Image (tube, grey):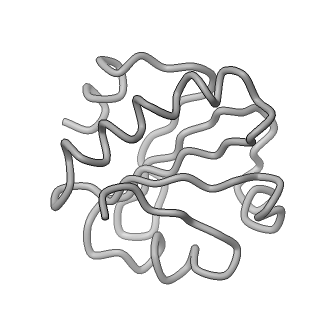
Amino acid sequence: MAEHKFTDDNFEEEVLKSKTPVLVDFYADWCGPCRMMAPIVEELATKYEGKWKVGKCNVDDSPNTSTKYGIQSIPTILFFKDGQIVNMAVGFQSKENLEGKLE
């Protein structure tokens, strides 16, 4: 399983308590740029498996988590390490830009 699904119910366990760094793509199914990002996120999940936990959090299905992190524009990508945000990217991002942040 390369790409993870993060929700209000599992966010603390899967992201905040993760032993490995985590990339969380906050998205919605109706969002065009989010749909354009989907294959990039899937590819990164496979490429960085074991180094990074990569996954998605649907803002419509997980409103508590989205509100907690102040997600106002989607896609928004947050990078977590040891339960803390260490980087972020808002709007469509190229694969190369995201890889630069993961390295």
Q: Quadrant of the N terminus?
A: bottom left
Whole-percent x and y of residue 13? 49, 83
Number of marks:
0
Relative to 16, 102 lies left or right: left
Q: Position of residue 59 (x, y in %)?
A: 76, 52
**Quarter of image, res 44:** top left
In the image, 51 versus 16, the foreground residue is 51
| Image quarter in which the C terminus is found | top left
Please, is residue 23 above or below residue 98 in the view?
below
Q: Residue at x 35, y 75 (%)?
A: 18
Picture coordinates of residue 39, whole percent (x, y): 44, 31
Horizontal placement of 61 versus 69: left or right?
A: right
Write the residue at 57% across / 22% down.
36
Locate residue 37, reporting x and y percent.
52, 27
Residue under the point 46% across and 54% down? 55
In the displayed structure, 21 sits above or below 99; it is below
For residue 46, side relative to residue 35 (left or right): left
Residue 99 in which image quadrant: top left
